[in-house]
Amino acid sequence: MEIASKYDPRAIEEKWYQFWIDKKLFHSEPDNRVPYTVVIPPPNVTGVLHMGHMLNNTIQDVLVRRARMQGKNACWVPGTDHASIATEAKVVKMLAEQGIDKRSLSRDEFMKHAWQWKEEHGGIILKQLRRLGASCDWDRTAFTMDDVRYESVIRVFVDLYNKGLIYRGVRMVNWDPQALTAVSDEEVIYKESHGKLFYLRYYIEGEDRYIVVATTRPETIMGDTAVCVHPEDERYQWLRGKKIVVPGVGRAVPVIMDEYVDREFGTGALKITPAHDINDYNLGMKYGLESIDIFNDNGTLNDHGGKYAGMDRFACRKQIVKDLEAAGLIEKIEDYTNKVGRSERTDAVIEPKLSAQWFLKMEGIAKRALEVVEDDTVRFHPAKFKNTYRHWLENIKDWCISRQLWWGQRIPAWYFEQNGKVETIVALDEEAARKVAAEKYGYTGALRQDEDVLDTWFSSWLWPISLFDGIRNPGNPEINYYYPTSDLITGPDIIFFWVARMIMAGEEYMHDVPFRNVYFTGIVRDKLGRKMSKSLGNSPDPIELIDRYGADGVRMGMLLTAPAGNDLPFDEAICEQGRNFSNKLWNALRLVSGWQIAGESGNPGESGNSTTNATAVQWMEQRMAQVLEEIEKDFDQYRLSEALMAAYKLAWDDFCSWYLEMVKPAFGQPIDRETYDATISIFSRLMLILHPFMPFVTEEIWHQLEIEKLKLKIESKSDTVNPEQISFFNSQFSIMNQHMPTSVYYDQRLLDEFDTAREVIAGVRNLRNTRGLSPKEMLDVSYIAKDDRFRVGRFEGIIRKLGNIGKIAPVSEAPAGALQFMVGTAECYVPMSQNVNKEEELKKLQEDLKYYEGFLRSVMGKLSNEKFVSGAPAAVVEKERNKQRDAESKIAALKAQIEALG
RNA sequence: GGGAGUAUAGCUCAGCUGGUUCAGAGCGCCUGCCUUACAAGCAGGAGGUCACUGGUUCGAUCCCUGUUACUCCCACCA
């Protein structure tokens, strides 16, 4: 059978993914196995796959596939997030493009458009995840606003309200004038911004004197209701009891004195606008100041703005400065850089605004959430994020959970007026609310539901519970089985938004943590270390990458440079390494499947014999056990890139470069049956080890190897295997649910002996390279071993084969006219038929000698130090003595050789 | 303004809390090779005062002081 020399992932990846789906291999149902549960961090339903998702989901898939192969019942639940602000903004924009103004639509009409849009454009990202090979249980695909999740959110709201943890209050909130909604503190991003600091003249009422007040926001003077100075500020003592005229407005306001003011900043005098600054608001409360709100919700000025009414706040700023300047009320203007809060979703400048919002009390909930992380009930990887987490929870404020949007779970609160008083009823639905109204208040009139929806995170915080319907049906078999989930894989940027809150919800509703481990990935950056973003255009399209390098190649590329918690400077070139590796494995398959098998007893060709091959197999088995041990340790510590690197080297270096070369028959020669069986078996297990990282190529190769086995069972390998049997096998079995090999005891001595053998081979190859000797020319090797650390023994055949060596034998004296190299303390010689270049060899020997003499000096330095010999542990001193002996012996040998040459 | 983290080869990172798996890996680079699985490859090789400074110790990449440089998080200085 002809196999292409280049691995082509395209068709193969498609074939196997379809196969996995058809066979329902990703699907999980509770059974008596140990569960392994992962819930996907739900991407925005409107999102498209970016590199961050690639990294995140590759890691999840690796963990899930590995767990599955370890015999656990792996369940990876996919889904999307309704992302209320982002999605609503998109829908509004889409409607605007069609000439539809959101304000012209009723709530129901708008929601219809939004749902339709979601059905048409939503969930692209989940389809893209399939290209990556994600082994999600697609039958369980959920949406944060589907019926189960919606109802869960409503129930939780009602429950928390009834527990007294949710309240409604008028507070200063972060207002997004573009999205027309409040956002939480976490959704405000403070960005550096270059602005001006304006020095305004405030005249004293009835006098010709003025003071100067610095502000960055002159447009807010219409809302000024006081001027504040420090009570101990000498410069302003005379202001006591005076009233001050707001420039351009003409209103007289009181002077207040408070220690809040920083005397060093500006002029030490501060204008107070309680409606538009959180600090001013607090001062306003303290001194009973009037609060004048001068803005409309969209950031334009309202009637309090006087002649500026209707203008946008930034346009107004320009105009007002012009007008004040004209009136001689501006002292000076300075450039000024400060941090301005912007909305995470819309980038609009946040306006502090007083409004009625719903809040969730954090105090008790936060305390428990902190405890379970402190005591490692939930473990963070890397652990340094515990600090961040602690800091936030210790300074947490109540969570503003209402949003002035339509796309989301509508707050289940109803209002009605009775006796001139507005009453609030929180209930599961309108019917229930009506019932309460009737029973409790004797009211049977119309109810008005709260217009707002809940913060998106108020639904995602339930995700690990609501996915298994644990809110609506507590104690159902699914939630009992799958909860708590095992690992959560997410970015550190949502540690507050999501991770912390899921832990809170878990404690509140399940009395248990939502997951045992949290793996924080790094942020994917470009080569230059910049964050990947659409606006920079530095983010490669993941699907295009997959087209070019194969999903396996891209997965491997991502993982190789992604230690937990470290940012990942992504360079496309790294995917090449992954692609090359797939190709390497593919070619190993080509080699092995092309071998012919010798008849009954091993009748090895000239280049090998069965003991040689038996040793090779033995060594490879030991080596594999050793590396498996390493890999298991790496996984225990969530060091995925290290685990992958170990597996990579096992396959490429140990298996391909060493093992296959050891057992490879000479051209046209068959291989013995035992070795062949062993090779297929080892190769097959290698595929199992690699499968979590590279699911597609390993599935393909594994199948072909298993078919090789099948052929062998029928008779001595022949081409007359029943094709039906092959297709039956292919259609029934998958590498996915084979059992992951585990480490077993291995013989360290054998591995050490191989290392010696490898050094001899490398020594000979090096001589060939540096002396220009052809690899085809067979050489002899003789050696003088100083102790039993140097053993040729069972590796003799292998050394001869891989080094192309004729005879290898011990001698008691250095032969004349030979090239030499050392392995440990042993001296190896390659006698030359022609004369060697004496000067060259002498030079090399002198260099070696110099090195060892220097080495010996440093060892002797330690050993002659009385304090070292008496202070250091005996074992350490003994090691130094050994070094000394070895060095002395090497020096003696080198000197003897130099003598012989000279 | 507070808090945390990082600094090791050209690049990306390991180095399990002080001593031959202590100076490592992968990529890149250099030198030979189209050697019948693979040039997406094979063989060999060169690269590092472990940021700087003191200190503890018989001994420091590792522990402690300070300095410098980056990164991240938090915070209402107009």
Image (cartoon, rainbow, N blue to C red):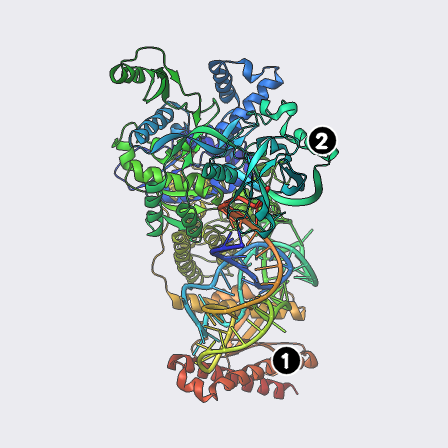
Q: Give whichever of B45, A777 is nearer the camera.
A: B45
The amino acid pointed to by label 2 is Asp
Residue A337 seen by the camera: yes
For residue A159, side relative to residue A650 (left or right): left
Circle on res. A323? 2
Tell me: residue A855, above or below residue A716. below
Please say if A457 is above or below A897.
Answer: above
First in sequence: mark 1 vs mark 2: 2
Label 1 element class: helix
Camera-side residue of A826 and A670: A826
Q: Badge 2 local density, few (<14 within 10 Å), some, or many (20+)?
A: some
* Nearest to viewer (mark 1 / mark 2): 2
Q: Which residue is mark 1?
A: A847
Q: Amino acid at mark 1?
A: Glu
Q: Secondary structure at mark 2?
A: helix
Mark 1 residue crowding within 10 angstroms, few (<14) / some (14–19) / many (20+): few
Estimate the spatial distance between the alpha carbons at disc 1 and disc 2, rounded to whole Å. Answer: 85 Å
Residue at point 42%, 31% (across, down)? A401
Q: Tell me if label 1 and label 2 are in contact, CB under 8 Å.
A: no
**Chain letter of disc 2?**
A
Residue A595 percent location from the top left of the image? 49, 49
Same chain for the residues under marks 1 and 2 in the image: yes
Q: What is the x, y in percent for residue A891?
A: 55, 85
Label 1: chain letter:
A
Residue drawn at point x = 47 percent, y = 67 percent = A755
Counting from the top left corner in percent of width and height, residue A866 is at: 44, 89
**Outermost residue toward the top in this view:** A445
